[in-house]
Image: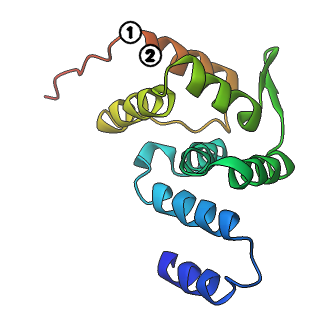
């Protein structure tokens, strides 16, 4: 499926802005390495958008962020506003370029222990659990 998308974009290369094309290729490549625990979590795609943004510079980056703002909805959970195109670049700067890597470490750790991130049933409960688990190491219980 990914290869088909790449071929389509290569043919459309003259019709699509080169910066957007580079961004789409980076975003889709990044999605190939997403932890399984993020499958089905709609907001996980924002990590791929952020990775792509980090690969672009100047006007290409501005166009990418502008497009991201147009397609990414603002979400509120318990008075916390989640809007990745606004927050992720700020977090990346504040963390001296470590934000995306640190977030991925958390999700890979959750993936190792097969933590379910389905936010459909109880988004606030899972959000609270995720925030707490990101602050404390997860200990594996022995299987009998």
Front-most of 1 and 53?
53
114 to 40, vertically: above or below:
above
* Residue in the picture at 77% in, 83% down: 15
Quadrant of the frame with the C terminus? top left
Q: Residues within 10 Å of mark 2 (few under 14, many from 20)?
A: some
Q: Residues within 10 Å of mark 1 (few under 14, many from 20)?
A: few
- Compared across the picture, whether 108 is left or right of 23 comes to left
Q: Quick one: which residue is furthest to the left in this view?
A: 144
* Residue in the picture at 44% in, 50% down: 34
Front-most of 99 and 130?
99
Residue picked out by circle 1:
136
Under circle 1, the secondary element is: loop
Residue 53 locus on image (x, y percent) = 62, 47
Q: Quick one: which residue is furthest to the front in this view?
A: 58
Residue picked out by circle 2:
133
Asked which colour scheme the image uses, the reply is rainbow
Front-most of 130 and 11?
11
Residue 32 locus on image (x, y percent) = 43, 60
- Compared across the picture, whether 49 is left or right of 142 comes to right
Callout 2–callout 1 Cβ contact below 8 Å:
yes
C-alpha separation, residue under disc 2 versus residue under disc 1: 5 Å
Kindly tell me whether residue 80 is visible in this rendering: yes
Label ID, residue 4? none
Under circle 2, the secondary element is: helix
140 to 59, vertically: above or below:
above
Kindly tell me whether residue 122 is visible in this rendering: no
């Amino acid at each position: 499926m990914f290869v088909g998308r790449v071929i389509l974009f290569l043919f459309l290369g003259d019709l699509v802005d080169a910066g957007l094309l580079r961004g789409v290729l980076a975003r889709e490549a990044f999605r190939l390495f997403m932890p399984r625990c993020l499958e089905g979590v709609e907001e996980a795609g924002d990590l791929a958008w952020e990775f792509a943004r980090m690969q672009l510079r100047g006007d290409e980056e501005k166009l990418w962020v502008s497009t991201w703002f147009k397609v990414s909805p603002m979400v509120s959970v318990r008075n916390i506003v989640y809007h990745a195109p606004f927050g992720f670049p700020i977090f990346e700067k504040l963390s001296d370029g470590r934000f995306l890597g640190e977030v991925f470490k958390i999700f890979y750790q959750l993936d190792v222990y097969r933590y379910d991130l389905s936010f459909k049933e109880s988004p606030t409960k899972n959000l609270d659990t995720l925030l707490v688990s990101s602050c404390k190491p997860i200990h594996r219980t022995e299987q009998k």
